[in-house]
Image (spheres, grey):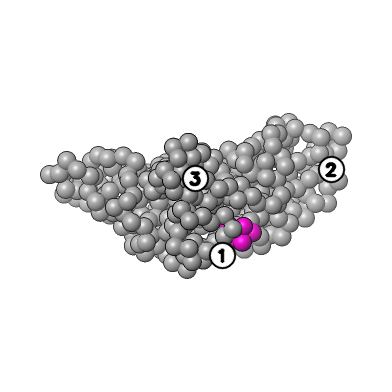
């Protein structure tokens, strides 16, 4: 079987991830920060070790500024809904996933002003267009770092500089780039970084978080929920300090145990090595698909300007039909359709039918890419 659906969720996971989760379930199991006994302490130690690993990966200012959430969707909702008020203006791109776009559209209905900056037909964004969208009431730029549809990388360093120049908050959705591209919150001027555990961080589902930079005014940041934190139990008011202000309710410690193992594994491999492997896979797949008459590829052609997520169509054929044939006849698992991002498909001209998407990851090989190219070649011939 060839698993080319890593853009949705990575599979398989690195060695040690399942074992760390089993170890927690079998030997630890207790609630972190809710008691002083040794199992609760061990559980709390795992949570903190995960914060430290994540902080190292993103060069976060402090492990305690990481708020764990169930996924990046929850992290983006927390940042957007917690900070944007009616009458304020936010700028985003036309290549956003619905996890960014839907909360923004909901806020728009409540009086937040929204500008969606148009990307080109390859999904690329011109930083100057972000700057031209500035208004006197702009408070935030909120964008993804790489498209989950075509893999195009957005210039977050340049956009971060614009955010800093205009004294705006900069929120980045790293769903597709965490663990693949080097990310440095300080250097890239990122104030709010959303991540998800189950994609390119190779951890389990149900993990993710929001890292809150030091420029964010916590007093003006509303939590999405209130409740038990294990701290200051004498008060009926939510604590004001991080991460407890935003981390109510028992954490997914079994998931975090897995995320701790996967992020440490990634740090050991080195992000540069992961990136190099993915560039090789993307280059090989792009060259192979380009050589097939009747295949249209979307996004940037240059592997250095993209991640290893590649969208294409066999001209005249429905993506759903291709996906089914790839699965049933060639044992290749991928995703077809709109990939939860209608805005991206409108931008690249594939709305409403969508594309076939091959999402490759660290465990895919050049041999698998060869088999996929041969399969697409055969399907293109057979479906003529
Ligand atoms: C760019 C981007 N943002 C957000 C998400 C949502 O991720 P999750 O379901 O883990 O919250 C995805 C998932 O595909 C994504 O690719």
Judge from the rendering whether residue 45 lies leftward or rightward of residue 188; answer left or right.
left
The residue tagged with tag 2: helix, strand or loop?
loop
- Rounded to the nearest angstrom, the CA distance separating label 3 from label 1 is 23 Å
Percent across and percent down for residue 319 are 72, 35
User: Which residue reaches farthest front?
Assistant: 136
Circle number at residue 294 = 2
Mark 1 or 2, nearer chain start: 1
Mark 3 or mark 1, which is nearer to you?
3
Give the vertical position of 375 relative to 54 (above or below): above
**Residue 205 visible:** no
Q: Where does label 1 land, which residue? A: 158
Q: Where does label 3 land, which residue? A: 113
User: Which residue reaches farthest bottom?
Assistant: 187
Mark 3 or 1, nearer chain start: 3
Q: Nearer the viewer, residue 162 or 343?
A: 162
**Residue 169 visible:** yes
Mark 2 or 3, nearer chain start: 3
Whether the residue carrying mark 1 lies under 8 Å from ligand 1 is answered with no
């Amino acid at each position: 079987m060839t698993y080319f659906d890593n853009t949705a969720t990575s599979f398989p996971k690195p060695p040690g991830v399942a074992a760390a989760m089993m170890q927690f379930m079998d030997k630890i199991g207790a609630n972190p920060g809710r008691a002083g006994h040794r199992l609760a302490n061990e559980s709390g130690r795992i949570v903190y070790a995960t914060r430290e690993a994540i902080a190292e990966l993103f060069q976060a200012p402090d492990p305690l500024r990481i708020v764990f959430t169930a996924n990046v969707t929850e992290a983006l909702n927390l940042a957007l809904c917690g900070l944007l008020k009616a009458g304020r203006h936010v700028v985003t791109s036309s290549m956003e996933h619905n996890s960014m776009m839907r909360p923004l559209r909901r806020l728009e209905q409540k009086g937040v002003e929204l500008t969606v900056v148009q990307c080109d037909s390859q999904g690329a964004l011109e930083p100057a267009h972000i700057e031209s969208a500035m208004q006197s009431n702009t408070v935030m730029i909120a964008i993804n770092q790489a498209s989950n549809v075509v893999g195009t990388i957005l210039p977050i360093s340049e956009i971060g500089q614009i955010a800093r120049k205009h004294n705006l908050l900069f929120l980045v959705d790293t769903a597709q780039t965490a663990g693949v591209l080097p990310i440095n919150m300080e250097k890239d001027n990122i104030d709010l970084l959303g991540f998800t555990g189950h994609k390119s961080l190779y951890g389990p589902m149900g993990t993710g978080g929001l890292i809150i930079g030091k420029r964010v005014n916590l007093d003006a940041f509303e939590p999405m929920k209130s409740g038990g934190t294990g701290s200051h139990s004498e008060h009926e008011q939510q604590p004001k300090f991080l991460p407890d202000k935003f981390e109510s309710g028992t954490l997914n410690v079994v998931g975090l145990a897995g995320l701790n193992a996967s992020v440490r594994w990634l740090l050991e491999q080195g992000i540069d090595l992961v990136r190099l492997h993915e560039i090789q896979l993307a280059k090989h797949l792009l060259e192979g698909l380009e050589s097939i008459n009747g295949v249209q590829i979307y996004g940037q052609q240059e592997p250095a300007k993209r991640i290893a997520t590649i969208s294409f169509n066999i001209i005249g054929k429905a993506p759903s039909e291709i996906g089914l044939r790839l699965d049933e006849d060639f044992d290749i698992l991928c995703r077809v359709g709109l990939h939860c991002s209608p805005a991206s498909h409108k931008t690249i001209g594939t709305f409403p039918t969508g594309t076939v998407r091959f999402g490759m990851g660290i465990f895919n090989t050049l041999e698998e890419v060869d088999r996929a190219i041969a399969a697409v070649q055969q399907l293109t011939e057979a479906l003529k």
